[in-house]
Image (cartoon, helix red, strand yellow):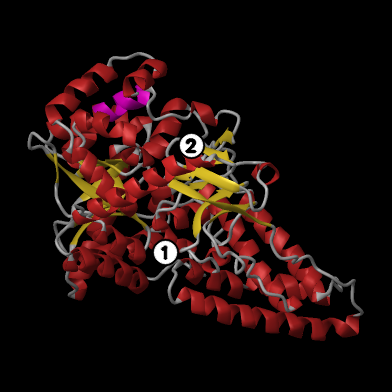
Amino acid sequence: MKKFPLNNVASSGIAIGTAFVAQGVDLSPIGGDIAPDEAEDQIAAFVRARDESLAQIGVLAETNDIFKAHLDLARSSSLYNGVVDKIRVKHKNAQQALKEMEGSLAARFESLPDPYLRERATDIRDICGRIMANLKGVSLNIFDSINEDSIIIARDLTPSDTTMMDFSKVKGFITALGGVTSHTCIIARSLGLPAAVGQGNVMENITHGQFIILDGEQNFAILDPDEATIAEYRTKIAENAELAEALKKTANLPATTTDGHTVEIFANVGSIADTVAAKENGATGIGLFRTEFLYMEGKDFPSEDEQFAVYKECADIFGDAPIIIRTLDIGGDKALPYFTFPTEENPFLGWRAIRMCLERQDVFKTQLRALLRASAFGNIHIMYPMIISLEEYRAANALLDECKRELTAEGIAYNANIPTGIMIETPASVMIAEDFAREAGFFSIGTNDLTQYMLAVDRGNDKISQMYDSFHPSVLRAIKHVIDAGAKHGKMVGMCGEFAADKKAMKLLLGMGLHEFSVSPMDIPALKDRIRAASYAEVKDFAQEVLVKPTLAEIKGMLQ
């Protein structure tokens, strides 16, 4: 029996099974360069394979939103023109041309600083791999031989990989590559399966067919466990399943502490499917609707009507409950396939979010008009990201007022009193939180960026990523200052960063007076349950004790 640590558990839980080491189908190109008169036949072969792939992806897109974006990528002129050019001009055969374009397009995404966009390189490889399989006439399904409970061990996993899995048999994932925004993590969390990503040489350490326990609660794996250990973990799995079933039954109960203090549990979402899941899991509202996905998945900026349809559908699902929709948070480190952003040395500090929107008022007003129109059908709130000054907040609201006047002139209904607020994610917004609280309708603390900016730590830099920690005393005191500023002026303060779902942070944030936690839909039932088991009086005392500790080590010691 051998135990080894897992560094990056992105979805918790426990799994027991046989290791299925996914080696993949051989999709390497075969054949040499071609004569010029063979080009049209090779182009025709590529087009047939692409069309066959589009049909396959179209079927998948009917039940999985991820593949709707794949359809756009597969149809993209960049891919098509690039392959055709390599065949016709460079005299590459179709397979060679496709493989070279796959490498080129994937490299573009991998060079981006934003973790979410870097992961889209996997989507490019997935699409090109499917086209290559159709070119070569081979099956992509390497998982059809799984006939027992298994844990997938892979270099990486694509969306297409997971569609071929039987999840009555697949119990968890461990991958060599990937980050917390990877498709593997998204799928694992939505299914409640444990997953560890970015594990380096895991495929060299685990043998195909080896029995394994994946403990995503204590962050390690056990190879060749003995019978006593297996029995112990089977008992834990049964207990977890029983608890999960019980939590589902209480998901719609309010998050009220033992001494009568109630907080709101909202959801972070990026699509209508997420919104439905949030409702099913007991969310009392939407704390963060990430609108950038609407912009990333198309061939051009989405129109007012396209956006309105999505925002209205979200409103229809949640009725009178608050729906906080963040305006476009893109630019700098988040690229769009149809718009060229300036090259920046420090993109996280660059032309992004509200800075871009205030300059590109045509894009911004299109979104604001769509949000206003949707506000006639539900309790829509508008949240501006990356705000560092009252001037920015007032400028954004001035454009909103322009849009209101336009809609009034056109006879289109909207909520004239639509609430507007800001994300608190910079030291600047923390320092002047009281000034913001006098004018803004609400705050939502974005701990992912706030932690990065407070500590001057690039969370994507492996050399210093261990320094990125939201429990740092400066970050905790910043959070408390913002909560107090909101409370002083009667404004709701929520949190939509990953820290809101941290089990160790719950009592601390509750004790600080946080009004609203916004987390992944799957995290909602358990978070509500933990809050219902807490005493507000006790956690307030606990928070006061923690906040005076001067070191991270002392804070972590108290949290144990």
The image shows residue 317, relative to residue 138, as above or below, that is above
Residue at left offset 17%, top offset 71%: 413
Task: Assign the N terminus to one quadrant of the image.
Answer: top right
Q: Nearer the viewer, mark 1 or mark 2?
A: 2
Task: Assign the C terminus to one quadrant of the image.
Answer: top left
Magenta-colored span: 473-480
In the displayed structure image, the side of residue 43 where residue 336 appears, left or right: left
Q: Which numbered disc covers residue 373? A: none
Percent x, y of residue 351: 48, 45
Percent x, y of residue 371: 27, 63
Does the magenta stretch mainly form a helix, a strand or a loop?
Answer: helix
How many marks are shown on the rendered structure? 2
Which residue type does callout 2 highlight? Answer: Asn
Q: CA distance from mark 1 to mark 2?
A: 34 Å
Q: Tell me if residue 91 is in the magenta stretch.
A: no
| Other residues around mark 1 within 10 Å, as few (<14) / some (14–19) / many (≥20) | some
Could you say which is closer to the camera, residue 436 or residue 157? 157
Which residue type does callout 1 highlight? Answer: Leu
Disc on the earlier residue, 1 or 2: 2
The image shows residue 301, relative to residue 249, as above or below, that is below
Q: Which numbered disc covers residue 294? A: 1
- Give the residue pinned by disc 2: 219
Q: Is residue 78 visible?
A: no
The image shows residue 286, relative to residue 413, as above or below, that is above
Residue at left offset 27%, top offset 46%: 526
Could you say which is closer to the camera, residue 318 or residue 354? 318
Residue at left offset 17%, top offset 55%: 252
- Farthest residue in the front direction? 227
Q: Is residue 335 visible?
A: yes
